[in-house]
Amino acid sequence: MNSWFTVKVKYTKQLENGTFKRVSEPYLLAAMTFTDAEARIYEELGATIRGEFLVTGISRTDIHDIFSYDDADTWFKCKVSYDKIDDEADKKKTISQNFLVSATNVKDAYERIIESLSTLMIDFKITSIIASPIVEIFPYREEDVETPKKRVQPVVQYEPQAIGKIFSASGLDFDDFQEDTTDEEEDEETESEISDEFSDSDEA
């Protein structure tokens, strides 16, 4: 089963003014394992980065879906939550999922998430929108797996919009993602927040 991985790469980058600077940049890609993620990042960046580069970190990243628009190259991480009834416990739980959308600013990202999730058969709310430092995304490729699993349709369904592309890691089920409850696991976000600040702590 494929998952999303964030891979941090350090290399010497030529800036627009012609000078060189040692930078650390994160990339998001779909892979089956950490080893596959490392092999693929060398494959993807080997022809585009001049000189040597070093993989400094690989982490599994919880992203449900990615909405790509051709008119923007800045990524925003949007956290969406909705309530679900637990039939066994007979009580309501709050589910949170992360989405990435390319947009020009926070307002644009908000409108595009609303548009992309407009066919959800349940009420949802966007609890945060944060500009992501992700430089580029390498989505799932069918040739990476001989017989990829067919994606199971989630209980909450939506249809892709005509505008933009959707990237999904093949084989991911709706129940594979972490279910957070407001009472127990989401103590860091007690109210909706919208931020337009980049947060890349691994600058050179």
Image (spheres, rainbow, N blue to C red):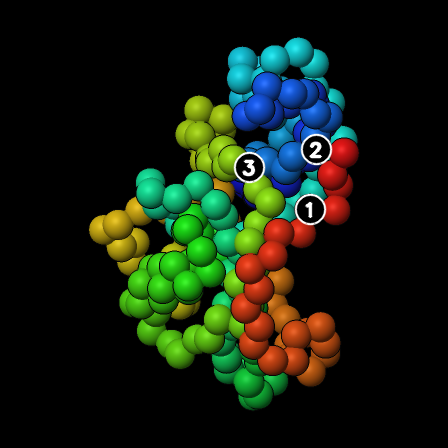
- x, y (%) of residue 137? 50, 37
In the displayed structure, 132 sits above or below 82; it is: above
In the displayed structure, 199 sits above or below 178; it is: above
Mark 1 lies on residue: 200
Mark 2 lies on residue: 24
Which of the marked residues, 2 or 3, is nearer the chain's N terminus? 2
Q: Quadrant of residue 10?
A: top right
Q: Considering depth in this image, is 121 or 124 the residue closer to the camera?
A: 124
Image quarter of the C terminus: top right
Give the residue type that dot 3 points to. Val
What SS does tag 3 mark? loop
Left or right: 143 in relation to 56: left
Seen at 30% across and 54% down, the residue is 160
> How far, Cα to Cα, is label 2 from label 3?
10 Å
Q: Considering depth in this image, is 107 or 45 the residue closer to the camera?
A: 107
> How far, Cα to Cα, is label 1 from label 3?
11 Å
Question: Marks 2 and 1: in contact by CB < 8 Å?
Answer: yes
Which of the marked residues, 1 or 3, is nearer the chain's N terminus? 3
Q: Considering depth in this image, is 19 or 186 the residue closer to the camera?
A: 19
